[in-house]
Image: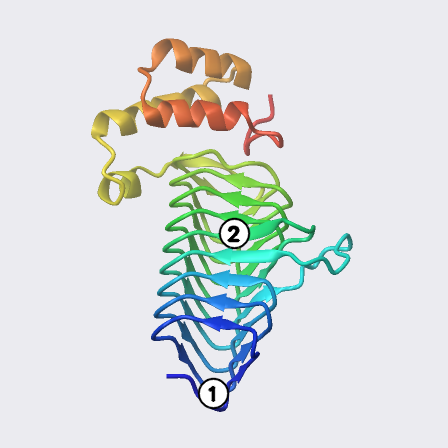
Amino acid sequence: MISPLAYIDSSAKIGKNVTIHPFAYIDKNVEIGDNCTIMPYASILDGTRMGNNNIVYQAAIVGAAPQDFKFKGDETLLIIGDNNTIREKVIINRATNKGDSTVIGNGNFLLEGVHIAHDTYIGNDCILGNGTKTAGNCKLDDKAILGSGVILKHGCHVGSWSLLRDSCRANKDVPPFIVAAHNPITYYGINAVLMSKAGGFKDNIVDDIAKAYRQIYQCGTSLENALLRIKELIPESPAIKYLINFIESSDKGIIGITI
């Protein structure tokens, strides 16, 4: 059902079985896939490419021009996958430079007041709590959870299965599988309950991850030496390999490391 009270640009491409409620705004150069729902007063703006089975709630602004002084009006994209829930007053900016994209994957849940800035990449099955904000060029790997009021500074990378507790401020990368808390943000343990119950991680893998982070955060040694110890002492697995690669490839460094 498409309400005659909605504004839909003649160039917009609308899929099958899409519901667009009264007073929604669908801009030019927009593509919306099948079985999506656009609630009243939601705006889907120029450059948005939306997949199937998404729902966009009231007053959300999807595909807004980037809040970036470098933006010169180039044609850029916001690419959204399938099965995402975008709640009230969420703002998602498209990319800054021509040919670039902001990307939202599949199955994500963005709660009220979330702001996703330009050129950010959100993987699959992430949860962003009320009022959470990312600066530009951030990256969230699959299954990351940001509590309410979290702020990610420019270019931060959050690993899979990491949980940032409410109101954390991250100015470095947050490695995978951990709980991060407090301000200044720091390591608070591993996300063992969710990993075991929702992720199907075996007990021995959870134990190995916990041992790895003891080397990093609780042994009083350098990060370089901690990584060497992990490689020597802990059995290799996809999770441990991902953990090591994440830290070794971090440009900003990881939270909670001072030595």
Q: Which mark is residue 103?
A: 2
- Identify the image quadrant of residue 218: top left
Residue 71's place in the image compared with 21, above or below, is above
- Residue at image x 44%, y 88%? 3
Look at mark 1 in the image and give the residue it sits on.
22
- Identify the image quadrant of residue 72: bottom right
Residue 248's place in the image compared with 38, above or below, is above
Q: Which mark is residue 184?
A: none
Quadrant position of the C terminus in the picture: top right
Q: How many marks?
A: 2
Q: Going from the N terminus, do you reach mark 2 or mark 1 first? A: 1
Q: Residues within 10 Å of mark 2 (few under 14, many from 20)?
A: many
> Can residue 222 be seen?
no
Instruction: Please name whichever residue, 111 or 29, is drawn nearer the observer in this view of the structure.
Output: 29
Q: Position of residue 5 (x, y in %)?
A: 50, 90
Quadrant position of the N terminus in the picture: bottom left
- Residue at image x 58%, y 68%? 29
The amino acid type, in three-letter code, at marker 2 is: Val
Q: Position of residue 23 (x, y in %)?
A: 52, 86
Instruction: Please name whichever residue, 60 or 202, is drawn nearer the observer in this view of the structure.
Output: 60
User: Could you tell me if the residues under marks 2 and 1 are in contact, i.e. CB atoms within 8 Å?
Assistant: no
Residue 193's place in the image compared with 114, above or below, is above
Q: Position of residue 227 (x, y in %)?
A: 47, 16
> Can residue 171 be seen?
yes
